[in-house]
Image: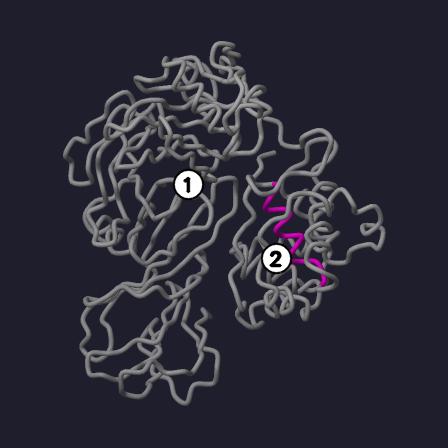
Amino acid sequence: MTGARYCDLVWLAYLVLPDRGRRPRRIALARRIADAAVAGRPRAPRRRRTRVLRAAARPSWRLGVGLGPWLRALPVRLPDPALTRMLGRLHPDVRIAYVLRRLAGLPAYEVRDQLTELRVRDPAAVLAAAEAAPEPPARPEPFTPERLRPVRRRSLVPVTAGAALTATLVAALMATGTGGDGTAAARDVRLVVAAPDAWRRGARTLDAWPARGELAGDREFVRRALRAFAAATGDGSGPAYLLFAGRVGGTPLAVLRRGQRVVRYTGPDGPARVDAAGDAADVPLALGGGRYLLPPWDTAATTPDGRPVPVRAGVAGPVDPATPCGRGPLFDLHGPAGVRTIGDLGGPRPLALTYRPPTGPAATRLTGGGLNLWRRLGCVVPQPARPLTEAAAHDFWWGRLPRDAGRGDWACVRLAFAGGGTTAQSALLTPREVLATGWCDDRRPAAGTWWKMPDGHWGFLAAAGPGTMPGVDGKPPRVARRGRLLLVPGPTGSARPGAVYHASAH
């Protein structure tokens, strides 16, 4: 089980627990519940989640007995108390549905299946109540592995090398001297290096990425990187996987990994930066300066318009998105799985971008309209709080906008997180602007937003996907419909109207 999945269980337990007691006790209870769910023999992720939700919704008083080890554990940054107060006012079953649907971003069908597994009476009614509940006062950030670890004498998150990995303890690279931050902690750090062809002989995981770069054999540089790794992570035990040691834009750089954390060290006396980079092996790692360390099985890279991207020792670039905000499509990767487009949405790692046109299957390579769409979407899709592996966009409405405003497209973007879980965000693209329009259900999309039309009037515009009709909650005075597009006329002027409406699909 990965550290990110453990953190997701703690995050769910924390939000689903009743709003009682102080926040340190609440996080201690959440961690105890998550620890119990992952203890013992391996269980499927769905079963672990079910155990956590069942225990957190109606916690036994026994969980508060002997809570000391969890109370003494390293604290984490906790969500806004206003959010947990709001959640505490919901019925426990509705609270579960709200957290899974509105905060975790699970699709409605999966939430209904989870409620059924929890033996909730009338899951459809519970889900409807969660959908009708108020918007959250704050969006909670997920807990990250570097700040949250299981409270056990023996780690619940072992690091496994795999059959294809050559795990080598290199004594000459151990930091056994005295003095300097991280030196004592680094004494027990094991340097792990995959064989150059490990990825050819086993699973294509991050563990099978070989160490690349012209400084991978520089013992002194790697020794300093290990010291920085131990100091930055605060953990000198266990292995550190060397992924890269070389010069990027003339600056020495080492990249080491443990679990889902990646440490970037710039020598000789530069800082060490820790990122929650996820465990996805099929997307590159950002090295800085527009350069990216590619998976070893990808053979070439080209810009989206077909020009070659320089690749040397597995490092592609420099290359930047051709957008005003510096986010969006980067390059196409060519490998055994075909061609896929890699993009930057501002998170700790780039990700695969796909586009499904209004009619037809999902495309893995962005061309034409899909490429133009993502060059605009990249600047409005919210920056993810944790690593993503894929962002899949599709137009669920397209056509003429009201008041002679030209053609518009409404897109729903499904975001897949490294380690599991998804969410989705929508955006309205007009000839003049791109508007982020909030969460959407990528299987049954609908979205709405206040929009200022060319004639100066405001209107609440809503649309729904094919086969459905848009609706609006909030008792608007009048509604104009045209196919799958809905307009609530509003006032004129520069100030955005204060009325709150919510779009839905029927």
Q: Nearer the viewer, residue 448 or 252?
A: 252
**As drawn, is 195 to the left or to the right of 419?**
left
> Which residue sits at x=44%, y=61%?
440
> Which residue sits at x=26%, y=37%?
289
Q: Residue type at mark 1?
A: Thr
Residue where numbered disc 1 is placed: 389
Q: Which residues make up the magenta segment?
A: 6-18
Return the x and y of residue 76 as percentages of the image width and height: 60, 49
Which image quarter: residue 448? bottom left
The disc, 1 or 2, on the residue closer to the chain's N-terminal end is: 2
Q: Is residue 381 magenta?
A: no
Q: Residue type at mark 2?
A: Arg
Element assignment for label 1: strand
**As drawn, is 193 to the left or to the right of 298?**
right
In the rendered view, would you say 185 is above or below 72? above
**As drawn, is 88 to the left or to the right of 308?**
right
Residue where numbered disc 2 is placed: 112
Which image quarter: residue 293? top left
| CA separation in Å, label 1 and label 2 | 25 Å
**Total labels drawn:** 2
**Disc 2: CA contacts within 10 A as few (<14), some (14-19) or many (>=20):** many
In the rendered view, would you say 352 is above or below 379? above
**As drawn, is 51 to the left or to the right of 270?**
right
The numbered mark at residue 302 is: none
Q: Nearer the viewer, residue 245 or 445?
A: 245
> Which residue sits at x=46%, y=50%?
385
Q: Nearer the viewer, residue 183 or 48?
A: 183
